[in-house]
Image: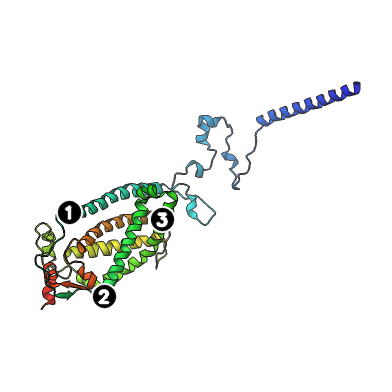
Amino acid sequence: MKRSFSKVLGTLVVTLGLSLTLVSGMTFAERAPMAPLPSPSGVDIPPSSVPANPNALASGTQAQSQPANPSIFTAPNSDPQNYVSIPDKQAGVLIQRAGQEWRVIRNGVITVYGGWLLAIAFFGIIATYTLKGPMKLHEPMSGTKIKRFSAFDRLVHWLMAFSFLALAFTGLMILYGKYFAMPLMGGAAYGSFLMVCKNIHNFTGPLFTICIVIFFLLFAHKNLFGKGDMEWIMGFGGIFTGKHIPAGFFNFGEKFWFWFGMTFLGLVISGSGFVLDMIVPFMDMQYLRGTMQIANVIHSSSAILMTAMAMGHIYIGTIGSQGSIDGMKTGYVDATWAKEHHELWYNKVNK
């Protein structure tokens, strides 16, 4: 009985001693300063960055005079490049302020005002067709055909036209699809659909550029400023009077579309698209974030402007003007149409 009691008493004494030792150790550990542990990244915070008085961090006084974090963390929203050891040197900028500016321009200025421009062009064409209808010839078709375009001319034109339509549709889906297509299709289906659109857009772009260059070489000499163009400008192409102003092979409106719409905007869109696709030839291009953002702004704004102009070109060349599409369908136009729309060229052909 005494032996059992002594064993129990010894066990209690040992337990009490261990408990007191543990409590005293925890108290000492709370009061004793502890050196900073190595960071998981392998970059240790220098001892000078550890505050001497951690309680001063609450008031912020010591945090201002001696920050606890390196500058890359305390000033992340800055453009200066910090050192990184990986190949991608852009990773040295934690937050790029220009990215937010690009987002505001893309989703604000370009998307909103570009959408309004496309809507005005589209509904303006519908209103014109509804109120005035197609432009009819003043005289009946004669049945006499005059050759206007060769088979190669028409092949290049239609390749350029269909590639443009593919680029315009897929580009509008990329820019505006999330506002109306994604709610209808759902996120997963829209993501797959957009990936298809992106691939079509990327692979069709070079074909469109090649067609622009070839078409430019074929018709640049016929789009030079010449006789009848100033009269066409002063009379606004006869829009208000309804009178057809004599013109050569192309009138000034077609020449403006050729030089500004097709050539200038087309090449600007192509060049900026090559930057976005990272396939710029004949030069060493650094595809940095800033470069890609500028290229995206130029590409989107130019594409929207060209699309709005193309709507008018397509309308006049198809249902908007009687007989206009015959030239690109068959290569021949009726003599009545040629005389009424391009009288100077008609007189030259019939000499």
Q: Find numbered disc 1 in the image and state the secondary structure of the residue it sits on.
A: helix
x, y percent for residue 96: 43, 48
- Amino acid carrying mark 2 in the image: Ala
What residue is disc 1 on? 130
x, y percent for residue 213: 30, 69
Q: Are marks 3 and 1 in contact (CB under 8 Å)?
A: no
What residue is disc 3 on? 193
Residue at the (30%, 67%) spot, across then down: 160
- C-alpha span from label 3 to label 1: 34 Å
Mark positioned earlier in the residue sequence (3 or 2): 2
The correct choice, above or below, for 13 with respect to 312 in the image is above
- The circle drawn on residue 149 is none
Mark positioned earlier in the residue sequence (2 or 1): 1
Q: Are marks 3 and 2 in contact (CB under 8 Å)?
A: no
Rendered image quadrant of residue 302: bottom left
- C-alpha span from label 2 to label 1: 34 Å
Q: Find numbered disc 3 in the image and state the secondary structure of the residue it sits on.
A: helix
